[in-house]
Image (cartoon, rainbow, N blue to C red):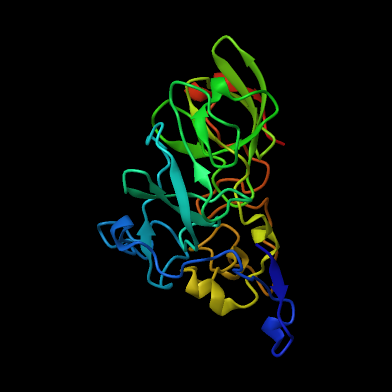
Amino acid sequence: MATKRLKPDTPSRRFNVVPTFDEITKSKPERNLTVALRKTGGRNHHGKITSRRRGGGHKRRYRLIDFKRNKFDIIGTIIAIEYDPNRSSRIALVEYEDGEKRYIIAPDGIKVDQKIISSSEKSVDFEIGNAMKMKFIPDGMLIHNIELKPGKGAQMARSAGCYARIMAKDSAMITLKLPSGEMRMVSEECAATIGVVGNKTHENSTIGKAGKSRWLGRRPKVRGVVMNPVDHPHGGGEGKTSGGRHPVSPWGTPAKGYKTRKKNKPSNKFIVKRRK
């Protein structure tokens, strides 16, 4: 999971850093574990743009990831590490003893032929890739693929290099320190996977050129200060102007330092410490 710096053959490649893909062992996905992914171009069912700067991009198939890890007490074997165009982490193909295959998020350090297991009613070995309820995991352990509601499936710490740490346990609640620095409480009945999400060097990669953004389905971004007054609050003026007001979105919402989280959100009571 390393990166390499390309030779400066062109201006765009001079500072380009790309992954080496050394850990990938299988190039084509399991067809029956994928579904078609239809692109919207940022349009809704009326054909109106509701998400700006989207469109184009390479064609993809969505890999069905087992975020619930509900194949309990059956040993699975890692048979391949694969690339997933839909996420920053790598995925691992697991074959269970009964012959079923599933994809999971590949933890850092996972190897082909390694055994993994998940359990709902007991503790299993604290090995990388094993999943269980957090009430069975000791304090201080690094975990990922964390559920917010028991049985719903993992929702937190799923991207490349992410992990959370179990800080404390009290009255059926687990206090976690999340990648953002936020401290929040989660039910001890929620499941999590031991270890850190793989592909930790993803943050060192660079786009390198405008064309790669287009491959990813990202269209160019136009600054508000170069628009007309009808198009953006920063638009208009004679010559080059800087907007003449605090930065806002096209709809007038402040862009820097303005808190948009709802104060009466039900989950607020579970946050022990805000992120920085």
| Residue 76 vertical placement versus 73 (above, below) | below
Question: Can the viewer see residue 49?
Answer: no
| Picture coordinates of residue 159, whole percent (x, y) | 56, 49
Q: Which image quarter is the C terminus in?
A: top right
Q: Residue furthest bottom?
A: 9
| Picture coordinates of residue 119, whole percent (x, y) | 45, 29
Q: Residue furthest left?
A: 46
Residue drawn where x is 74% and y is 82% of the image: 14
Question: Can the viewer see residue 16?
Answer: yes
For the image, the number of numbered tags is 0
| Picture coordinates of residue 144, whole percent (x, y) | 57, 39
Q: Is residue 244 left or right of residue 38?
A: right
Residue drawn where x is 49% and y is 68% of the image: 218
| Picture coordinates of residue 271, whole percent (x, y) | 61, 24
Using the image as rendered, state which of residue 113 and residue 250 is in the foreground.
Answer: 113
| Residue 82 vertical placement versus 209 (above, below) | above
Residue drawn where x is 35% and y is 61% of the image: 30
Residue 172: image quadrant is: top right
Using the image as rendered, state which of residue 122 and residue 257 is in the foreground.
Answer: 122
Q: Which image quarter is the N terminus in?
A: bottom right
| Residue 128 vertical placement versus 94 (above, below) | above
Q: Residue furthest top?
A: 171
Residue 223: image quadrant is: bottom right
Using the image as rendered, state which of residue 121 and residue 61 is in the foreground.
Answer: 121
